[in-house]
Image (spheres, rainbow, N blue to C red):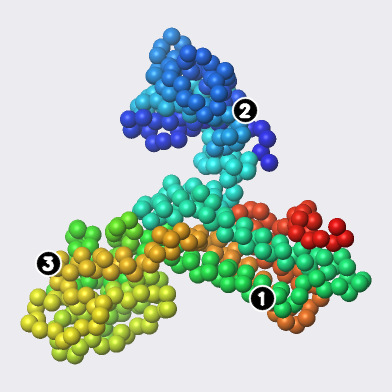
Amino acid sequence: MYIDHDTIVAPATAVGGALSLVRLSGSRAIAIADSLFHGKKPLAACESHTAHFGSIYKGEKLIDEVVATLFRAPKSYTGDDTVELTCHGSAYIVGEVLRLAIGAGARMAEPGEFTRRAYLSGRLNLSEAEAVADLIASSSEAAHRLATQQMRGGYTTAIEHLRDELLQLTTLLELELDFSEEDVEFADRGRLAATMEAIGAEIEALRGSFALGNAIKEGVPVAIVGAPNVGKSTLLNQLVKEERAMVSDIAGTTRDVIEEQIVIDGVRFRILDTAGIRATEDRLEKMGIERTLRTIERARIVIRMIDAAEVAQKGIEPTTFTLREDQHLITLINKCDTVTALPTLPEGVIRLTARTGEGVESLQQALHRAVGLEALEEGTTIVSTARHYEALTTASEALKRALEGLQADLPTDLLSEDIRAVIIAIGSITARGEILPSEILNNLFGHFCIGK
């Protein structure tokens, strides 16, 4: 537990706007702020969570008129006494305020130190602290919403629920160990297996959400694929509203993967223009096609473009590549302005003329639908951090071992060890770690009646 700190200071907003905020936090934050700030009364005499107008002087020279907001420990972001000085956004003013605070005994905060202190003082758990970083880095509405849900503890609630269920299992098994000489079985093996399977399903649901969470956080990867000269680069240019990819009538112009980013209705997409897929003896073009296939593998959405003339002659032929179950395929018929008639197209196939932009809006709507934001909109817990996914994978594997041990009628002490391995993996997400003996005792006496 964090008990005492040096007082740290840093700008909490970017310099150069109309206003900037300088944050002081630590055991001497109020005293140092009082040495700079001159209001109607000292901040030391003011109540927590109050704002005060005053001035900051350097000797007799006025630096700025500011608003000082006071947060007393432990009810502050860091858990320490904190003062936030809102001044004008001039780089000179912010620099002078920082120099005066450092001269009065504060030190410059290290990157992320305010949030680190919030975590160490128990104001945030580890997953919530990570969500703060995600919130700052969010580049779309969906990423912002996801980070906000996690920062407000929605993710923590799901993890703590799992941990509580595992605590019940551990308590029952510990009881059996305590009464091992009497050969008493407190945990009915059938019910135990059913409970473990239910916990496993919850873990798998969280693991399964990672594909969506990571895509929202990092940007949804979308591969544009098709034969050479079908209009892939033209479509990319239409989507980003710029001439980002070279367009030519010569087939095989695109040899490498070109990536651009766009935001559609609050979701960021990473659009990947790939080399055309065809049989070729050109060594460089072959390398480009190999990169296209690798790009398809890492895409969440694949846009397949087909020339309208080809569809008019042959219909829509099967793809030459294989998609995973979690990938979404969108089929586009391009150059529709060059043919007089097309056969009846399957539902969901989009008609497009990339050269003019006709049909692009329908494609954008299809892209947004393909992401599958229903879970986010419904407030479902979504995993977006690779560390959490790896921890859940470790927990899942340990739980499978426990179930196998249960089916093999392993001794109670070995079963208990496997359950503890699950708990450690789950707990690493929020840094709760292993269940303590005191937690088992509290749960035991709180939920079970043994001789009163």
Q: Which quadrant of the rendered structure holds the C terminus?
A: bottom right
Query: Which residue matches tag 3?
Result: 356
Residue 189 visible to an observer of this rendering: yes
**In percent of the image, x 46 and y 58: which residue is there?**
379
Assign a secondary structure to mark 1.
helix
Within-10-Å neighbours for mark 2: few <14, some 14–19, many 20+ = some
Q: Disc 2, disc 1: CB below 8 Å?
A: no
Query: Which residue matches tag 2?
Result: 27
Decide if residue 414 is on the left or right side of residue 197.
right
**Most distant residue in the top direction:** 60
Amino acid type, mark 2: Ser
Q: Nearer the viewer, mark 1 or mark 3?
A: 1
Indicate the position of residue 236 as horizontal and vertical percent values.
23, 65
Assign a secondary structure to mark 3.
loop
Q: CA distance from mark 2 to mark 1?
A: 51 Å
- In this picture, is 282 found above or below 45? below
Amino acid type, mark 1: Ala
Within-10-Å neighbours for mark 3: few <14, some 14–19, many 20+ = few
Assign a secondary structure to mark 2.
loop
Observer-nearest of 16 and 264: 264
Q: CA distance from mark 1 to mark 3?
A: 59 Å
**Residue 194 disc label:** 1
**Residue 131 disc label:** none
Q: Which quadrant of the rendered structure holds the N terminus?
A: top right
Indicate the position of residue 130 as horizontal and vertical percent values.
52, 51
Amino acid type, mark 3: Thr
